[in-house]
Amino acid sequence: MRIAVCPGSFDPVTNGHIDIFERASNMYDLVIVAVFHNPNKKPLFSMEERVELLSISTKHIPNIQIDSFSGLLNDYVRQKNTNIIVRGLRALSDFEYEFQRALLIKKVDPVIETVFMMTSSEYSFLSSSGIKELAKFGGPIKGLVPECVEQRIGQRMLDY
Ligand code: ADP
Protein backbone atom coordinates (compact mmCIF):
# COMPACT_ATOMS: atom_id res chain seq x y z
CA MET A 1 0.00 0.00 0.00
CA ARG A 2 1.44 3.37 -1.01
CA ILE A 3 0.87 6.01 1.66
CA ALA A 4 1.59 9.74 1.38
CA VAL A 5 1.75 12.16 4.28
CA CYS A 6 0.69 15.77 3.55
CA PRO A 7 1.91 17.85 6.50
CA GLY A 8 1.06 21.50 7.08
CA SER A 9 -0.39 24.14 9.35
CA PHE A 10 -3.66 24.42 7.40
CA ASP A 11 -4.65 27.55 9.32
CA PRO A 12 -7.09 27.47 7.63
CA VAL A 13 -7.34 24.91 4.83
CA THR A 14 -7.79 26.56 1.41
CA ASN A 15 -8.98 25.29 -1.94
CA GLY A 16 -5.30 25.20 -2.97
CA HIS A 17 -4.67 22.55 -0.31
CA ILE A 18 -7.79 20.60 -1.28
CA ASP A 19 -6.59 20.55 -4.90
CA ILE A 20 -3.28 19.00 -3.81
CA PHE A 21 -5.09 16.38 -1.66
CA GLU A 22 -7.40 15.42 -4.53
CA ARG A 23 -4.51 15.00 -6.93
CA ALA A 24 -2.39 13.09 -4.40
CA SER A 25 -5.33 10.79 -3.68
CA ASN A 26 -5.22 9.73 -7.35
CA MET A 27 -1.57 8.80 -7.02
CA TYR A 28 -1.45 7.05 -3.64
CA ASP A 29 -3.60 4.40 -1.97
CA LEU A 30 -3.90 6.49 1.16
CA VAL A 31 -3.27 10.20 1.84
CA ILE A 32 -2.73 11.19 5.47
CA VAL A 33 -3.15 14.91 6.05
CA ALA A 34 -1.30 15.81 9.24
CA VAL A 35 -1.88 19.13 10.95
CA PHE A 36 1.29 19.99 12.72
CA HIS A 37 1.91 22.10 15.73
CA ASN A 38 4.27 24.93 14.87
CA PRO A 39 5.53 26.48 18.12
CA ASN A 40 6.58 29.64 16.22
CA LYS A 41 3.10 30.51 15.00
CA LYS A 42 0.03 31.67 16.89
CA PRO A 43 -2.77 29.95 15.02
CA LEU A 44 -6.16 31.44 14.18
CA PHE A 45 -7.87 28.06 14.48
CA SER A 46 -7.01 25.57 17.21
CA MET A 47 -5.56 22.20 16.27
CA GLU A 48 -8.95 20.54 16.89
CA GLU A 49 -10.76 23.07 14.71
CA ARG A 50 -8.26 22.70 11.88
CA VAL A 51 -8.69 18.93 11.99
CA GLU A 52 -12.48 19.35 11.99
CA LEU A 53 -12.46 21.79 9.06
CA LEU A 54 -10.16 19.48 7.09
CA SER A 55 -12.42 16.49 7.84
CA ILE A 56 -15.54 18.31 6.66
CA SER A 57 -13.92 19.64 3.51
CA THR A 58 -12.35 16.35 2.40
CA LYS A 59 -15.46 14.16 2.84
CA HIS A 60 -15.59 13.63 -0.93
CA ILE A 61 -12.14 11.96 -0.98
CA PRO A 62 -12.49 8.30 0.02
CA ASN A 63 -8.83 7.44 0.63
CA ILE A 64 -7.91 10.26 2.99
CA GLN A 65 -7.31 10.44 6.74
CA ILE A 66 -6.95 13.58 8.84
CA ASP A 67 -4.60 13.55 11.81
CA SER A 68 -2.51 15.90 13.93
CA PHE A 69 0.93 15.68 15.44
CA SER A 70 3.64 17.57 17.20
CA GLY A 71 7.26 16.56 17.07
CA LEU A 72 9.59 15.55 14.30
CA LEU A 73 8.04 14.99 10.91
CA ASN A 74 10.34 12.13 10.00
CA ASP A 75 9.35 10.23 13.15
CA TYR A 76 5.71 10.75 12.30
CA VAL A 77 6.17 9.58 8.71
CA ARG A 78 7.93 6.41 9.93
CA GLN A 79 5.15 5.75 12.44
CA LYS A 80 2.70 5.78 9.53
CA ASN A 81 4.73 3.07 7.78
CA THR A 82 5.73 5.15 4.83
CA ASN A 83 8.61 7.27 3.54
CA ILE A 84 6.69 9.69 1.33
CA ILE A 85 5.87 13.33 2.09
CA VAL A 86 3.82 15.32 -0.40
CA ARG A 87 4.06 19.11 -0.40
CA GLY A 88 2.44 21.64 -2.70
CA LEU A 89 4.66 24.14 -4.45
CA ARG A 90 3.57 27.60 -5.49
CA ALA A 91 5.82 30.36 -6.75
CA LEU A 92 9.57 30.75 -6.48
CA SER A 93 9.16 31.99 -2.92
CA ASP A 94 8.09 28.50 -1.73
CA PHE A 95 11.04 26.87 -3.41
CA GLU A 96 13.83 28.07 -1.13
CA TYR A 97 11.99 27.07 2.04
CA GLU A 98 10.79 23.73 0.70
CA PHE A 99 14.18 22.89 -0.77
CA GLN A 100 15.94 23.47 2.58
CA ARG A 101 13.30 21.59 4.48
CA ALA A 102 13.33 18.57 2.19
CA LEU A 103 17.12 18.35 2.32
CA LEU A 104 17.16 18.69 6.10
CA ILE A 105 14.63 15.90 6.48
CA LYS A 106 16.69 13.75 4.11
CA LYS A 107 19.82 14.47 6.11
CA VAL A 108 18.13 13.22 9.27
CA ASP A 109 16.56 10.22 7.54
CA PRO A 110 17.81 9.45 4.00
CA VAL A 111 14.98 7.03 3.26
CA ILE A 112 12.35 9.76 3.32
CA GLU A 113 11.35 11.27 -0.03
CA THR A 114 9.60 14.61 -0.36
CA VAL A 115 7.47 14.77 -3.48
CA PHE A 116 6.39 18.18 -4.78
CA MET A 117 3.19 18.83 -6.65
CA MET A 118 2.91 22.02 -8.62
CA THR A 119 -0.04 24.18 -7.68
CA SER A 120 -2.89 24.47 -10.14
CA SER A 121 -2.63 27.85 -11.83
CA GLU A 122 -5.94 29.07 -10.42
CA TYR A 123 -4.61 28.63 -6.87
CA SER A 124 -1.05 29.81 -7.35
CA PHE A 125 -1.75 33.06 -5.48
CA LEU A 126 -3.63 31.41 -2.62
CA SER A 127 -2.22 31.08 0.90
CA SER A 128 -3.68 30.68 4.40
CA SER A 129 -2.09 33.95 5.44
CA GLY A 130 -3.60 35.76 2.43
CA ILE A 131 -7.02 34.41 3.41
CA LYS A 132 -6.60 35.66 6.97
CA GLU A 133 -5.64 39.08 5.68
CA LEU A 134 -8.65 39.23 3.37
CA ALA A 135 -11.01 38.01 6.09
CA LYS A 136 -9.67 40.52 8.58
CA PHE A 137 -10.81 43.37 6.39
CA GLY A 138 -14.03 41.71 5.27
CA GLY A 139 -12.71 40.92 1.78
CA PRO A 140 -14.33 38.27 -0.45
CA ILE A 141 -13.06 34.74 0.18
CA LYS A 142 -15.84 32.83 -1.56
CA GLY A 143 -14.43 30.19 -3.90
CA LEU A 144 -11.00 30.37 -2.26
CA VAL A 145 -11.73 28.26 0.82
CA PRO A 146 -14.14 25.41 1.60
CA GLU A 147 -17.62 26.54 2.67
CA CYS A 148 -17.12 25.51 6.30
CA VAL A 149 -14.07 27.80 6.54
CA GLU A 150 -15.95 30.64 4.89
CA GLN A 151 -18.74 30.29 7.46
CA ARG A 152 -16.47 30.25 10.50
CA ILE A 153 -13.62 32.58 9.73
CA GLY A 154 -15.48 35.87 10.28
CA GLN A 155 -16.43 34.97 13.85
CA ARG A 156 -12.94 33.61 14.55
CA MET A 157 -11.32 36.78 13.28
CA LEU A 158 -13.10 38.85 15.95
CA ASP A 159 -11.00 37.38 18.77
CA TYR A 160 -7.77 37.07 16.79
P1 ADP B 1 3.27 25.24 6.26
O1 ADP B 1 3.06 26.06 7.49
O2 ADP B 1 3.98 23.95 6.50
O3 ADP B 1 3.87 25.99 5.09
P2 ADP B 1 0.69 25.37 4.97
O4 ADP B 1 -0.57 24.95 5.61
O5 ADP B 1 0.87 26.83 4.69
O6 ADP B 1 1.82 24.76 5.87
O7 ADP B 1 0.89 24.58 3.60
C1 ADP B 1 0.93 23.19 3.54
C2 ADP B 1 1.41 22.77 2.17
O8 ADP B 1 0.49 23.17 1.17
C3 ADP B 1 2.75 23.39 1.78
O9 ADP B 1 3.48 22.43 1.04
C4 ADP B 1 2.36 24.54 0.90
O10 ADP B 1 3.38 24.90 -0.01
C5 ADP B 1 1.16 23.94 0.19
N1 ADP B 1 0.26 24.96 -0.31
C6 ADP B 1 -0.28 26.00 0.35
N2 ADP B 1 -1.09 26.73 -0.46
C7 ADP B 1 -1.06 26.13 -1.68
C8 ADP B 1 -1.65 26.39 -2.95
N3 ADP B 1 -2.44 27.45 -3.13
N4 ADP B 1 -1.38 25.55 -3.96
C9 ADP B 1 -0.56 24.49 -3.77
N5 ADP B 1 0.04 24.18 -2.62
C10 ADP B 1 -0.20 24.99 -1.58
Image (cartoon, rainbow, N blue to C red):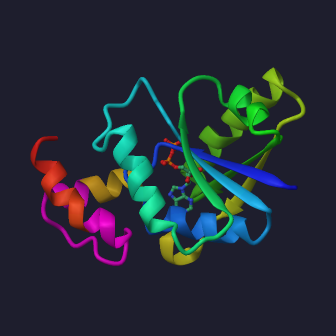
Percent from the top left, x then y, of residue 64? 64, 60
Q: Is residue 5 left or right of residue 140?
A: right
Q: Is residue 86 magenta?
A: no
Query: Does the magenta segment cover residue 142?
Result: yes
Q: Is residue 37 visible?
A: yes
- Using the rendered view, name the quadrant where residue 107 is placed: top right
Q: Which residue is located at x 69 percent, y 57 percent?
A: 31
| Residue projecting furthest to the left | 158
Which residue is at 38% across, 70% downward? Answer: 146
Instruction: Name which residue lies at 72% across and 26% down.
Output: 75
Q: Is residue 63 above or below residue 2?
A: below
Q: Residue at x 32, y 39 (%)?
A: 46
Q: Position of residue 89 (x, y in %)?
A: 62, 56
Vertical relation: 160 (above or below) 58: above
The range drawn in magenta is: 133-150
Direction from residue 42 to residue 20 in the image, left or right: right
Q: Quadrant of the image for the C terminus?
A: top left
